[in-house]
Amino acid sequence: YKSIVPKPATKYFPEGNYTELDLVTLSYVSDAAEEFGILSLMQMVDKASRRNKALNVTGVLSFDNGRFGQILEGKPKDVEAVWELILKDSRHTNVVSLGMKKINARRFANWSMRLCGREEVVAAEPQLKI
């Protein structure tokens, strides 16, 4: 019998020593690079929802006064795959991570991505100053 040692699972947050077995959350804020109408915002949420569902990532997004706040949950490699896309997305500027941390359970298990009001997102993650 050979013991299986989980491999480190993060590129952007190595200080957390996350493994592929962990469940994590990642929060960030960013500024919109351009003005967003409701249709553009809904299209972005729809696309993110489909992508996140395929990766088994859940979370919420808030958009208020040109500022995004988002909380992502999932396995470290899956959350980082979404994080990498956000960092490369030209619609976001001044992207600031509030870090990744281990969690015991998902808070948004039923939502691959949901657009919420600023108050709901800040209540879930007080560090998000949107």
Image (cartoon, rainbow, N blue to C red):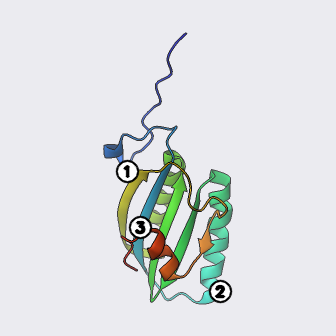
Q: Give the label, 2 or 3, closer to the camera.
A: 3
Question: Extreme left residue here?
Answer: 15
59 versus 43 height, above or below: above
What residue does disc 3 label? 28
Which quadrant is the N terminus positioned in? Answer: top right
What residue does disc 2 label? 39
71 versus 19 height, above or below: below
Q: What residue lies at 43% left-to-right and 64% top-to-bottom?
A: 27
Q: Secondary structure at mark 3?
A: strand
Q: What residue lies at 59% left-to-right and 62% top-to-bottom?
A: 108
Amino acid type for the residue under numbered disc 3: Tyr
Q: What residue lies at 48% left-to-right and 65% top-to-bottom?
A: 86
Q: Earlier in the sequence, mark 1 or mark 2?
A: 1
Residue 94 seen from this side = yes
Amino acid type for the residue under numbered disc 2: Leu
- Say whether residue 43 is left or right of residue 83: right
Q: Give the label, 1 or 3, closer to the camera.
A: 3
Q: Closer to the camera, 85 or 77?
A: 77
What residue does disc 1 label? 12
